[in-house]
Image (tube, coloured by chain):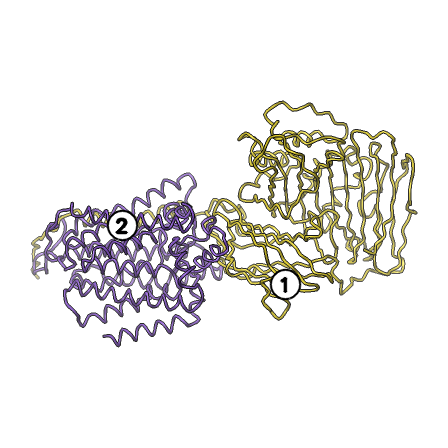
Chain colours: A purple, B yellow
Amino acid sequence: MTFEFALAVATRTVLAFSPLERLLQDDNQLSSPLTSYSRLQEGVYLFRHGIDPYAGGTFRHSPLSLSFFSTIVPASRIPPALLWTSLDAVGAWALVNIWRSRSNIQRSKRDLRIAAIYLLNPYIFLPCLALSTSTVETTLQLLTLMFASRGQSSLSLLTLAVLSHLSLPAILLLLPVLLLLLSDPLSHLASPKPFPQKLSKCVPLLVEFTVSFVTLALASTLVAGGWGWMRNTWGAGFLLPDLTPNPGLWWYFFTEMFDHFRPFFLAAFSLHLAIYVVPLCIKFQHDPLYASFLLLGILGTFKPYPTLSDPGLFLSFISLFPETYPYLRYPVVTALLHLHAFLLLPLFHHLWIGTGTGNANFFYASTLVFGLANGSALLDYVWAGLRVAIGEEKEGWVVTQE
Amino acid sequence: MRWSILFFFLSWRFSVTAAVEEYREELTLRPLVDGKLAAHFSFSTLLRSAVPRDPSSLGTDDTSQHYTLFPLALGQILREHAIPEFHLTINSGKWDYDRWGHPGEPGVGSGAELWAWMGDGTAVQTSIDARWKALQNSLSGLFCASLGSMDALHTTSPANAFLPTGDLPRLLAPARDAYTLRHATLPAERVCTENLTPFLKLLPCPSRAGIAALLEPHRIFDADWHGLGVHVRWRADRGVQLTLTVQVVLDSVRTSTERRRDWTLESLFGRSLPRSCNVASSSVVLVTLPSDESAYTLSPEPHVSIEGTWSRTSDLNIVMKWPEEERFSYPLNIPPLSDLSVRRTLKGSSQTHGELSVVVRNNRPVPVRTHYLETMPWHVEFFLHTLTVTCGDRGVDCASLLTNMTYTPSRPHATPAQLLATLELPPHETLHLSLRVRKAFLRYTEHPPDAQRGWDLPPAVFVPFDAPHRRIYTPALLVDLATPDFSMPYNVIIMSSTLIALIFGSLFNMLIRRFVVIEVDVKVD
């Protein structure tokens, strides 16, 4: 296991130093305006030269990233490549650990397969090669869930606070993470039962999260020298000032939006993202890890500035839930939709942006297919997660919903 | 300069008592090395001992205005908005500094450029931004130009590069920060007849007498390069001075059938100078003699000096000929006539990223220090960390030659970026500046009707330290931005919403409904 793992990481390290990075770095599907490495470098440059990086619209990273990359890691060629590769390795390790906690075993034959599915997932390693900071977010997401599965509440909540600070939509994971901390990560899909603990036990955890979140925000304000950073980082997710294409659903919608309807639909899209949290947590209260997994799928599909690593994380998580596989309704359709979108997205993006022979609708159509693929995967796993409890169908009987 | 200048006087009035208003007109004709001819018309009205209005008095009634020569329409604008100095130029074409040298009036950037120095008013209605907006609207009404679109997306304040050319009166109210510059360019604005007609109406002798009679629209707008300028400045010792300028670069080789560069006033402007303008205290035509060795003749004989009051009654038609030349042959190598040669290009075919490249060459044998000003609309974002400065053709790193950089980043959908730096150019050295830029994606309502044409970017400006009024403008650039499909708003709203509704609906359908196990009839074969 250790050898194979090391081999996979070594392969990534070699790839990280290949000339691929220069080709991929500014790809709109791998890094969004909120996660682009070029913009991070620009912010660090402005910060070092005494210009407020939040005065303009180019830099949208958190002040914490700013201070980290202007002091600890120089924004040159080799250190970031190593850092990103190790982040991915940590992510794979965290995913394997979540699996171990869920199946309640020390090691299994499945470990390597889970690590491989994560490390070889193109949606995960391409953004990593492009040095997109969405890799950092993915790793933090995995670490949050790993610590939560192990019951390490302080570490988990701190990681989640850092994560939500870097990417605000991730705060939606707070509720399932709290539930996970109060219960266990074991699979209870086959035997649904009401949540075993009192919800009031959440309160101290919630306070702990709030304290770390507010502390991070205050530290950022100190670094940035004012509150201006909030509008550029968190505000961007609500106001969508940058309409750079990405694989998500927001950018073309708000490019084509009538000006007088823009605030209404921005509010509708932001609220829509939050609307799934409580219903999913109620329905899957017996298995909060599964609820977190489904919420990752929601975020990957409906986030304001997604990159390929957001749906990639959801897809990598699938390997943790083998008990649901027999109950998937349309796995072939979903897989084909994903294949279709995976081939079309870069092709139509290049046709529109690179050669100028295609028009914006081509790429928009492929993002719709991608959205449909993510949505159908999500729906499949919601169905399968609920269906597991009924058990296998018998001859002459059909399981359906009333 | 080796050129000598000859004078032709149309009128000259010498009066002992200085009048309150004084009007002078002047035409400078300058044959250029590439066979073209640069004509610079200048109509200058001086309002003696007048003082610009103080912004603190804007709330109260103004003193009444009586002018005989100064245009009332413009005087009202100056008083209404308390403007001590402004410059408006609208140009068409690319001024070729290398072949044509420095122009008579430095504002030769393509499109419209407006800059004004204003004192701070005390009330909100009289704030600098409100008056800047009002000034644009008044001027666009007066000159039939679309200056009103110089909104916050175009406005910057590069005070170091655009110093006032006159004096600024002391403000009465203790203003917070005395005087502020507002500067905006519209590189896509074109100058045409509808701008010239109201322009001529501001002159005391509009197109009937004096030098203004030569401003025949068909000839002016047929020129290779043409531009109008309005310049108002105040000098403490003289008063408010209004200078209206017209600059044209005419090509006699192109219009002559024998491909010769001979010209007469009649061949250039379609008419000779009819008679002098009676209210002008001086009316002069100057001819700069060509610097090359070729033999030429000039008729009639120019005046050397004239004393007393003098006025011309007959037509004046200046004729300049190169009798030994069969036909004009374009010189192959013209040594650059300007202090700096600048080339600015936007490289890259992608619609998301590009590279801005600026090549500056110092043509003088002495080092030159110059301001370098880039104003960029928000839809082209600089990546300053990629800025490289190299010297010569070998690409030696010369980052130390670029100093004092100040940068105001752009805000999306709101304000432009402004980059101001100092360049130190060694003698006869070439500097290559390169910078990666990102091209933004606009909302479909932000695109102009002809979106596929691209966006004109304002010129970069170089202002040498030793000659601040000898600015050098680079040609404007065209940037190609990715366009959405303009027919799609409804379709996109419908299709995206359908997808979201489909996922939302199916998901809640599954969450809410209960699972049941139903017995089905087993079909009998």
| Position of the C terminus of chain B by quadrant | bottom left
- Expressed as whole percent of the image width and height from the top left, the position of residue B143 reads 66, 37
Q: Residue at x 37, y 55 (%)?
A: A64
* Closer-to-camera residue (B315/B494): B315
Residue A221 rendering spot, x and y as whole percentages: 39, 48
x then y, percent, for residue B462: 65, 53
Left or right: A396, with B250 as reference point: left
**Which numbered tag is attached to residue A172?**
2
Q: Examine the rendering and report whether any part of residue A337 can be seen.
A: no
**Toward which corner of the image does residue B210 lie, by quadrant?**
top right
Helix, strand or loop under label 1? strand
How many residues crowd around disc 2 within 10 Å: few (fewer than 14), some, or many (20 or more)?
Answer: many
Question: Which residue is label 1 attached to?
Answer: B431
**Same chain letter for marks 1 and 2:** no
Q: Residue B433 is drawn in which quadrant?
A: bottom right
Q: Nearer the viewer, residue A78 or A38?
A: A78
